[in-house]
Amino acid sequence: MPSTNQVLIFDTTLRDGEQSPGAAMNLDEKLKIAEMLEELGVDIIEAGFPISSNGDFEAVYEISKRAQRSIICGLARAGFKDIDRAAEAIKPAKRGRIHTFISTSPVHMKHKLQMEPHQVLEAVIASVARARNHVADVEWSAEDATRTEFEFLCRCVEGAIKAGATTINIPDTVGYAIPSEYGALIKALREKIPGADKVTFSTHCHNDLGLAVANSLAGVMAGARQVECTINGIGERAGNAALEEIVMALKVRADIIPCDTGIATSAISRVSKAVSNVTGFPVQFNKAIVGKNAFAHESGIHQDGMLKHTQTYEIMTPESVGVAKTSLVLGKLSGRHAFRDKLEAMGYELGGNALEDAFKRFKDLADKKKHVFDEDIAALVDEEIATGHDRIKFESLRVVSGTFGPQSAELELSVDGETRLGVARGDGPIDAIFNAIKVLFPHEARLAIFEVHAVTEGTDAQAGVTVRLADDGKSATGRGSDTDTMVAAAKAYVHALNKLLVKRLKTAPEALTAARG
Ligand code: KIV
Ligand code: ZN
């Protein structure tokens, strides 16, 4: 067993998580999430893949400038250009890491890389050595390690260690492994490879068979001391191992896996909500640790047991992951001070204009809604933060709907500060609203997802709407909330459009504006 029981938490929400279709985040959103990850106590933040776009480079660079405690990591393929770009991006970091990878499985080497095994081995050694010329902290990953021939994997890992890698990551890239098998692989590598005791072994498990967390824990039990994971388990296809599940499993079952993490677990719920808001990916109700129902007890027998003793049906307290009891908050007459105190208690720090805008929106909401709950405040402030820098802003909406069609929408948007008014008809009110947006801001994006949920209970609850737009192989997700579902839908569409537009501006500024004809 390794000499330490400390398991390092390597969060890749901003890199592997952001690779999920529709989860793209803009720079402000990434900075906000990175700040929250640092507060959460994440040891290593994989902030992006610097060579993949200027946006990714900028995000890694800016996060590197701001981070105080966490190690900031940039991803790179084995090519020298990738590695040099990653090195440049992490340069301002107090503690920086280059994470370089190459595929080692027969299927990847033959069809993806079109390289012979000996060429891959040479690339491993050269890439790690190149990265070591830039920084002392170098991680090497064998992509598709779990489908790699064991002997070849050993040679590559040995080569990486000799070339100077300090962390060896064994990804289950396609989520193929079974826990006993994955644990055995980590154990065998640690036992067989010369110098294995000098490096940290890491897990990186995808969730295609729903086993990402189980495999990661098996890896830890076999001696891995770094776990790569994402908030809410977001990531490619079925996602990555969920940070909150790994951390709480290690905490709750310390009797079986006696390992610690440096995570401040009471911040988990807040970060989970922020990631869900920023990406527009709702958290499933029954999701472990952070789902809406994770601490709800509906059946009579369970409620009775809970009243007698909470441990009858609760293996951890909601407070331990930052889930506070829903409370009735402020009313129509509440002032700025009470509002600011409430925000602080909920972990938000808003100053100046942002606080003023949020307060104004709270007052509007309190006029429309009798009871304003914590969730309402969170939806309102998250929207304020997410849309603060949007170029297209929702202003007002009037909709005609019902059985005596045609349905129509009269919509006011401001685009780069200029107010535009448009009217459109549609096959239903939502179609009419979205057509009106297209009149005001012509574009080709296609609606890929439209979802509505109630932020709280009751018929006067705010509607939370999620919209995903897709265009030209890219997609972006937006969210909006309002007591009027139509207004929430318009806000969500406009938010998604902004995210798609911002991405376009980084690569091809004329693309969307050209469509305005
Ligand atoms: O899943 C994977 O193999 C990866 C590597 C880049 C580490 O994300
Ligand atoms: Zn991955």
Image (cartoon, helix red, strand yellow):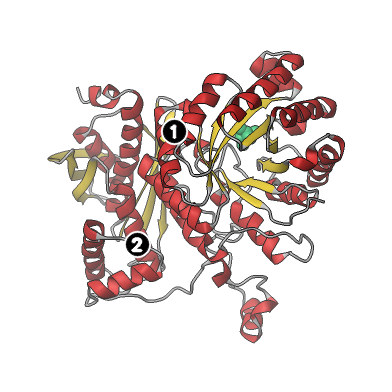
Residue 460 figure quarter: bottom left
Relative to 214, is 475 on the left or the right? left
Residue that protrudes farthest toward the bottom in the picture: 308
- Identify the residue shown where x is 52% and y is 58%: 40
Quarter of the render that holds ligand 2: top right
Report the disc number at residue 349.
2
Disc 1 packing (10 Å; few <14; some 14–19; many ≥20)? many
Residue 284 figure quarter: bottom right
Question: Which residue in the structure is indicated by mark 1?
Answer: 56
Relative to 195, is 366 on the left or the right? left
Contact between marks 2 and 1 (CB within 8 A): the answer is: no
Q: Which amino acid does label 2 sit on?
A: Glu
Q: What residue type is labelled 1?
A: Asp
Tell me the element at label 2: loop
Tell me the element at label 1: helix
Of residues 257 and 225, the one drawn nearer to the viewer in this rendering:
225
Give the position of the C terminus as an image quadrant. top left
Cα distance in 3D space between marks 2 and 1: 26 Å
Of residues 372 and 411, the one drawn nearer to the viewer in this rendering:
372
Relative to 238, is 193 on the left or the right? right
Task: Locate residue 400, reporting x and y percent.
Answer: 20, 49
Mark earlier in primary sequence (2, 1): 1
Question: In this view of the protein, can residue 474 be seen by the observer?
Answer: yes
Task: Locate residue 434, reporting x and y percent.
Answer: 28, 39
Above or below, 128 against 197 in this view is above
Disc 2 packing (10 Å; few <14; some 14–19; many ≥20)? few
Question: In this view of the protein, can residue 458 be seen by the observer?
Answer: no
- Identify the residue shown where x is 40% and y is 37%: 476
Task: Locate residue 184, reporting x and y percent.
Answer: 84, 43
Task: Locate residue 453, reporting x and y percent.
Answer: 42, 56
